[in-house]
Image (cartoon, grey):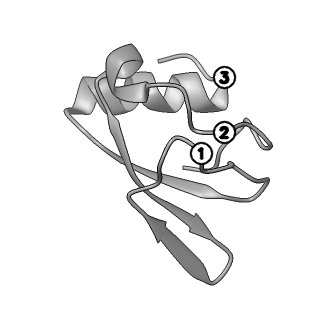
Amino acid sequence: MRSGVPGCRRRRRPRRETGATVVAVQRADRTVPSPGGDTRIEAGDTLVAVGERDACRRFRARVTGESE
């Protein structure tokens, strides 16, 4: 899913907050696997997250600002 929070760092703990885990960031023609807490989320990035269905819904809502 495309991130609605460009410019922020991935310091937040999405697994604690939503139950989903970010496993990669796709950026243009490259992929950042296992992004660390210092990974900056940029406009146009696609975040790849895994987790149970409800966790992924919560994650999407948190990142995009949409409702669950």
6 relative position to 18: left or right: right
Residue drawn where x is 47% and y is 49% of the image:
36
The earlier-in-sequence mark between 1 and 2 is 2
Up/down of 27 relative to 42, above or below: below
| CA gap, disc 3 and disc 2 | 17 Å
Q: Identify which residue, 9 or 26, lies in the foreground.
A: 9
Residue 62, given in percent of the width and then of the height, sits at 55, 22
Which mark, residue 9?
2
Residue 58, given in percent of the width and then of the height, sits at 41, 21
Up/down of 28 relative to 66, above or below: below
53 relative position to 2: left or right: left
Marks 1 and 2 in Cβ contact (< 8 Å): yes
Q: Quadrant of residue 19?
A: top left
Q: Identify which residue, 35 or 21, lies in the foreground.
A: 35
* Helix, strand or loop status at disc 3: loop
Look at discs 1 and 3 and give the one toward the viewer: 1
Residue receiving disc 3: 65
Residue receiving disc 1: 38
The earlier-in-sequence mark between 1 and 3 is 1
* Helix, strand or loop status at disc 1: loop
Look at discs 1 and 2 and give the one toward the viewer: 1
Amino acid type assigned to the residue bearing label 2 in the image: Arg
Q: Quadrant of residue 64?
A: top right
| View extreme (front): residue | 38
